[in-house]
Amino acid sequence: MQKLQWPLYNLRAPITQPYGANPRVYQRFNLQAHNGIDYGCIEGTAILSSAPGIVRFAGDGVGSPIMGASAGLCLLIEHEGQILTEYAHLSKIYVEEGQEVGREIIALSGATGAVSGDHLHWGVLEVPLALDNGYMGRVDPTPYLAGEVTGDELDDSTSEEA
C-alpha cells in the first residue's frame, strides 16, 4: 500500500470533519457519509502533494465528473497508477494537468465550491474507481497516511509558529 504524507504545510491544522462523519447530512447527496478528511485552515494555507505523482485534473470541479461542482477549485493527483488524491475548495492552483509533481506546494487552501468556511477537503480514491461504493469512489484515507510530516523536508522560514 502506498504511503502518503499529510497535505498541509501548516502542520497544526485540526481535522474538522473526518472520513465517515455526519451520515445524515450527506445522505441528501447520495453519500453514506463524509467522503474525505476536512482540515480547518485559513484561506491561503500552502497545500502539499501527499506523494509524487501526475496531476490528472486541475481546475473548477464542475469540469470533472469525479470531483463535481461542490469541490470548487480542485486537484486530482495520480500516484503510481494505484490511487488518486483529491484536494478541494482551493483558492489557487500552482500546477497543471499532466504535470509531474513531487512532495511540493501545489495549491493554496480556500473556500470555493459548496462550503461553509475555509478548509481543505482531502481524500483518496483507489484505482480502478468504484464510484458506486457509497462515497463516490472515495475510501478511508487514514490507512494510507504514513504519519505526520516532521517538518524536516520543509523550509521552516515560511511555516507558522504555535
Image: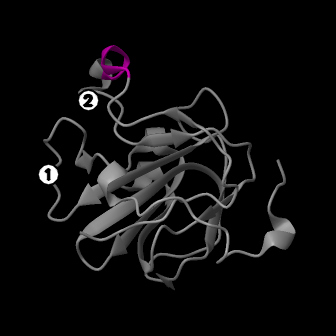
- Residue where numbered disc 1 is placed: 130
- What's the amino acid at mark 2? Leu
Q: Is residue 12 left or right of residue 74?
A: right
Which percent across, then down, holds residue 109? Answer: 66, 51
- Viewer-proximal residue, 131 or 122? 122
> Residue at horizontal 13%, vertical 42%?
132
- Residue where numbered disc 2 is placed: 31
> Residue at horizontal 76%, vertical 76%?
155
**Residue furthest to the top:** 24
* Label 1 or label 2, whichever comes before in sequence order: 2
Count of numbered marks:
2
What secondary structure do most residues of the magenta stretch adopt? helix
The range drawn in magenta is 22-26
Of the numbered discs in the image, which one, if any, rests on residue 59? none
Q: Is residue 106 in sight in this rendering?
A: yes
The quadrant in which the N terminus is found is bottom left
